[in-house]
Image (cartoon, coloured by chain):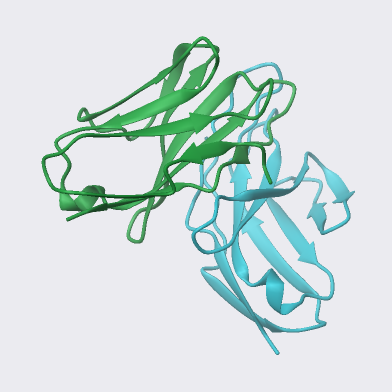
Chain colours: A green, B cyan
Amino acid sequence: DSGVTQTPKHLITATGQRVTLRCSPRSGDLSVYWYQQSLDQGLQFLIQYYNGEERAKGNILERFSAQQFPDLHSELNLSSLELGDSALYFCASNTPPENTEAFFGQGTRLTVV
Amino acid sequence: LAKTTQPISMDSYEGQEVNITCSHNNIATNDYITWYQQFPSQGPRFIIQGYKTKVTNEVASLFIPADRKSSTLSLPRVSLSDTAVYYCLVGAEPGGSYIPTFGRGTSLIVHP
């Protein structure tokens, strides 16, 4: 158990809809990372938050957004969903620079139909 | 970030030692080398991290030559449960920010 909790584990929704994925980081970790993993693209970094502020952006679509709340949990919002958004979405946490090891959650499997 | 190159797949048998080599020719002075393991439908799990020479923990060893342009993850006496994808990452900056960036990894299949 990594200590990172993601909910829900599975999500099935229709095209055009909007969903919210939730991540509770490991206790005390200030940084949260979001990743998307699909069969054809591998594990892609989306965005990082550190202590409530956006720190780095990767290959995140404009239809996607995220935030980190004062209690350090984070949410990834996916809107106007397309079939190609079907993937596993992982959240990871750590507290750089003390530890560069990232702890990953079990992921949310999103299926867009 | 330094680009990494590792074999797409490897096969081994139970009880054998497996060595997975990763090339990172343009590694920077402050970069660390980190390896993760991922099972299907699970999040990646940290295995080992090093800067130079050799690092060993309870599950693996990491060998890094003096020029640091490559690294080798060594898994002793693998079992069926070691079947997974192994990722080599480069690019930690002590005191700075670090985004774990994953390539395609090496798919290791351990046969009975």
In the image, farthest residue toward the left: A16
* In this rendering, position of residue A68 left or right of residue B56: left
Q: How many marks?
A: 0
Q: Position of residue B59 (x, y in %)?
A: 83, 59
Q: Position of residue A2 (x, y in %)?
A: 67, 42
- Residue A42: horizontal and vertical position, in percent? 41, 54
Name the residue: 11% across, 40% down: A16
Name the residue: 86% across, 47% down.
B53
Q: Is residue A72 visible?
A: yes
Q: Residue at x 48, y 20 (%)?
A: A49
Inspect this view and state whether residue B24 appears: no
- Image point 55% across, 35% down: which residue? A92
**Image quadrant where one finds the C terminus of chain B:** bottom right
A62 in relation to B87, above or below:
above
Is residue B4 or residue A13 the one in the foreground?
A: A13
Instruction: Write down the quadrant of residue B19 in the picture.
Output: bottom right
| Relative to A8, residue B111 above or below | below
Splitting the image into 4 quarters, where does residue A79 fall? top left
- Front residue of B34/B37: it is B37
